[in-house]
Image (cartoon, rainbow, N blue to C red):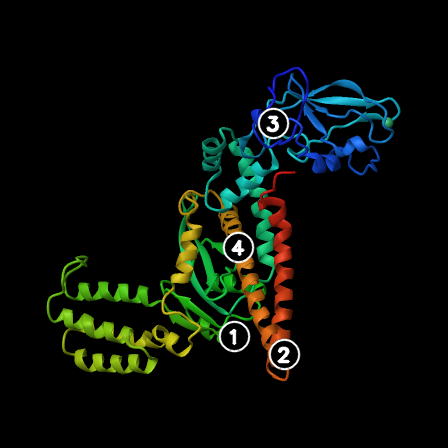
Amino acid sequence: MRDPFSGTPLIVGAVQTQLSDYWDGIPAVGTVARARLYPGAEVEHPEVSLPKLALGATGVIELAWPFCPHCGHKLAKWGVNPRTLILDKGHAPAVNGIQRYRCEVHGEISVDLGAWVPNGATYADNFRRRACRLVGHGHTPADVREIFLDCYDRSPSVSSIRTWAREAAIEAGAVIRTTSIPTSGFFGYDEIHLRVNGQKGYALTMADLHTGFCPPADYSPSINRSAVKAYFNGIKHVLVDPMAGLVVDGAINFGDLFRTRGFDQITVQRCQTHYKKNLNEKIYEAAGMGKKLKDPLPPPYDRVKRELFVPFKRSTGLRAEIQLVVADGRLRGKVSPAVDALLDDLVAHAPALFQYHYETRLQRTNNRDECWNSELERYPSLKTRMKTAAGVRRVLDAATFLHNWDAFTAYIKEMEAKNEKLRAFVKQDPRNADLKPELQGATVHLRYVRQWQARYAEVYNRHYMILQDPY
Ligand SMILES: [Zn+2]
């Protein structure tokens, strides 16, 4: 390696490295630099395929071969533009400026460094893209600055980071609200309790139980039947099929929503985990134990708990219902009015609690959506420190967008493998009348999914994709 501070210009071989890493004579940047330095020019000169940029001893980026791309005349130096460049991953070559050139026939010939740092900017575009990803993955702009400083020793300002992330989230929000996602029709639904500028508010969230996608979440200042109805209506058009089943934790009162037109086709499963937790607390209360949930229950309440919990352990809906009748026979009128009330409640909710036995595409608990909520809650300000509803939506939208982007990648891979298998079956058994329509259906579906992913890709490529080193 040559001493970088010797008098003769160095050929810049690997721009995204430390200055001391620049190797003499490696034609690494050649191809990209050629296109970037002479955009649109039909270049005939053989020199032009050689490395284009050189870093002089004074820290000025120069053309290694200062000849006019149009006519081949030697270019005259024409002053220096001062410039600082922070390349990807914080690498900062000792660049002080960019040499300007002039052809006596064609005027000024500009040196374009856009492959590394956007024109007029200081930081490589990947700083912006990494910032958008980090915020979308649950870091605040202030945290992102700390992360950059920890990793790269330098960082754009918090306000730059915030502006970038906001812009990306707004575009991501528009895409997730207007683009279909592959859905099974079966979802988990839940709310996250928020305080926005000191006021109560709610994030309404849903997660598909089978495809890995999440419909856009929304913000509502209140939570009741009409808020949920508005939320479901608002996301309807991104679901491929109408909602067929829902797991809910039952904390809010849906009223007659699931008997209303447009919603009466939805089968509801109540989350067993939530119900059992409440039931357990109520048994302790009935036993006069209050909140001492760790202590053993005294008789006969130990038996009450055992009897009431047995139906949840049964492997079919019928067995669960029989067990409920058995418990009713053993307990009703024999312990206390409070226990009778628990029986009434359990009987009333039994259809929703054991629904998953009959509709196996539902799930017994709301784990799926709860996992999704904890993904959203990784953004530390979300629950109590957001200032506006629009800010809440941006946090939810960016997270949803990145989540669904990953889901598209996984889903398409899975579908491709499935289609590959189907194709092999059709080949083996060409006269099987069932296989061909199945394959056709799957192929058409995959084509649609790719179109939806392509709409996501417009925003992903602009804001979230990490650019590769330009060489
Ligand atoms: Zn010229």
Of label 3 and label 2, which has the lower sequence position? 3
Q: Return the x and y of residue 402 as percentages of the image width and height.
A: 53, 51
Residue at (70% x, 38% y) in the render: 32
Q: Is residue 295 above or below residue 244?
A: above
**Disc 1 from disc 2: Cα separation:** 37 Å
Of label 4 and label 2, which has the lower sequence position? 4
Q: Return the x and y of residue 154 as percentages of the image width and height.
A: 51, 29
Along the line of sight, the residue nearer the viewer: 82 or 205: 82
**Disc 3 from disc 2: Cα separation:** 58 Å
Q: Is residue 292 above or below residue 123?
A: below
**Disc 4 from disc 3: Cα separation:** 36 Å
- Amino acid type at mark 3: Tyr
Which of the four quarters of the rendered structure image does ligand 1 lie in?
top right
Residue 261: mark in rendering: 1
**Residue 243 seen in render:** yes
Circle 4 residue: 406
Circle 3 residue: 22
Q: Return the x and y of residue 135 as percentages of the image width and height.
A: 50, 43
The mark closer to the camera, 4 or 1, is: 4
